[in-house]
Image (cartoon, grey):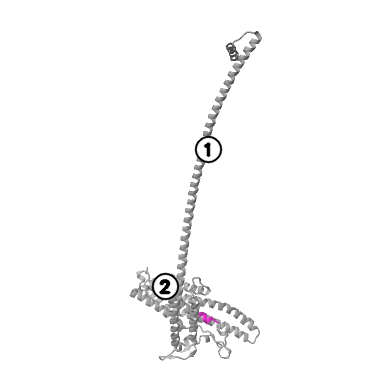
Amino acid sequence: MAGESGKIDPMHQFQIEPLAPLNIGGYDVSFTNSSLFMLIVLGALWLFMWGGMKRDLVPGRWQMAVEGVTGFVNNMVTSSVGPEGKKYVPLVFSLFMFILMANFMGMMPFGIVPGVHPFTVTSHLTVTAVLAVLSFGTVLVVGFWRHGLHFFSLFVPHGTPWWLLWLIPLIELFSFLIRPFSLALRLFVAMTAGHVLMKVLAGFVINGLNAQAAWVPLVVSIPSFILMIGITLLELLVCAIQAYVFALLTSLYINDAVNLH
Amino acid sequence: MPQIAQILETYASQFFWLLIVFGLIYFTIGKGMLPKIEANMDARDRKIADDLAAAEGARAEADNLGDSGEADLAAARLVAQGKANEAKAKAAKDAEQRLAKADAEIGVKLAAAEADLAKASAAAMASIESVAAEAAADIVAKVSGAKVSAAQAASAVKAVMANG
C-alpha cells in the first residue's frame, strides 16, 4: 500500500500482481492476486451455501440465512419476470452472490496481516465487463431464441405515435445497447471510488500521525478517522446495493427478453 | 489507474480465471446447490400447508362430533323426561284407582254398619215399647187394681210414644 518514500498511493490496491506465471496458447493467464481472490470468493460462497445444505424441516440459523438469500433472489426474479423466470434464478443468483462476496472480500481487513493486501475483484473493469456481457448475452440469446426477429419489436414500445417511429426505435436501440456498459461501469466505478476514498482517508490518518507538528494528528487524523468509520459503513452498504442493483437490472433485462415489454 | 493501465497485460488472465470461477459457481452452486435448497423450502411450505389443511379438517370433524353429541344428549334427555312423565302419570292413575276401590269398599262396609245400626236401634225401640207396655200394665194393676190386657197397654204406650 505504501509506495516509495512513505507516500501512500491510493491506486496501488488495484494493482494486479502475478503470483504464478502461466501461459496457455500464447496468452498470459498467470495466477494473480485477482485470481486468488476469485478463488477465495468461490470458497467463501461455497462454504456459505454448504452451511445451508442440511435441508432440515426446521432450519437452523445458518440454513435460515442461506434460505433468506435464495428466497430473496428467487422473489426478485419471479416478481420481475413472472413464473417463467424460475429458469433464470441460478444465473441471477450466481451473479448476485459472486458480486456480493467479491465486494465483501475486498472490504475484509486482511491488511492487518503484514504483506497481505485485500483485493476487490469487482473493482476491475475486465471482471465487471465479463459479468455484464454474461448478463447481456443471456438477454440476447433468450430474446432471439424465444421470439426470433420479433425480438426487435422491443424497440418499438406500445403506443408510439406514427410520426415518432423514426426516433423512438433509435433511442430504444441506443438504451438497449448501452446496458452492458452501464452494468459494467456502475459496479466498477462504485467499487473503485469507494476504495480510493477509504484509502485516501486512511492516508490522511497515517500521514497526520507521522507529521512533525503536534496539532496535525488532532486536526487531521482524528476527524479523518471518524469520517472513515462512517465511509466504511457506507461502503459496506454500497457493496450490498451494487450487487442488488446488478442482479435486479439483470432480471429486468431478462424480463424484456422473455416478455417483450 | 491500474485497471486501465494494466488492461492489456492482464485481461487474458482476468477472463480466464473469472470464467473458471464463475462457471464453477454457476454449475455447482447455482445449478447444483440452489435447486436443492429451494426444493427443501418448497417441501417445507407444502408440508405446512398440508398440516394446516389437516388441522382444519380435524377441527371441522370435532365440531361436527360435538354438535351430534349435543343432539344425542338432548334427544336422550327428552326420552327420559317422557318416560318419567309417563311413570308419574301411571303411578298417579294407579293410586287414584286404588283409592277409588278402597273408597267403594269403605262405602259398602259403612252402609252395612249403618243398616246394622238401624236394625239394632229398631230392635231396641221395639223392646223399649214392650217393656214400657208391661210396665204400664203393672202400674195400672197396682194403682187401680184393674186388669189391663197386654194389647191394651201396648196400644196405649204406642199412642203416648207417637205423641212424643
Mark 1 falls on what kind of element?
A: helix
Specify few, some or many for label 2: CA neighbours under 10 Å numbering under 14, 14-19, or 20 or more: few
Q: Chain of mark 2?
A: A
Image location (x, y in percent) of residue A228 = 58, 79
Q: Amino acid at mark 1?
A: Ala
Residue A42 visible in the current orientation: yes
Q: Are marks 1 and 2 on the same chain?
A: no
B69 vs B105: above or below:
below
Image location (x, y in percent) of residue B123 = 57, 20
Q: Quadrant of residue A179?
A: bottom left
**In the displayed structure, does residue A230 sit left or right of residue A35?**
right
Q: Which numbered circle lies on residue B95?
A: 1
Q: Which numbered circle lies on residue A86?
A: 2
Q: Chain of mark 1?
A: B
Q: Which numbered circle lies on residue A224?
A: none
Q: Amino acid at mark 2?
A: Lys
Mark 2 falls on what kind of element?
A: helix
Q: How many marks?
A: 2
Q: Main secondary structure of the magenta part?
A: helix
Q: Residue at x 48, y 47 (%)?
A: B79
Image location (x, y in percent) of residue A92 = 44, 76
What span is in magenta? A103-108
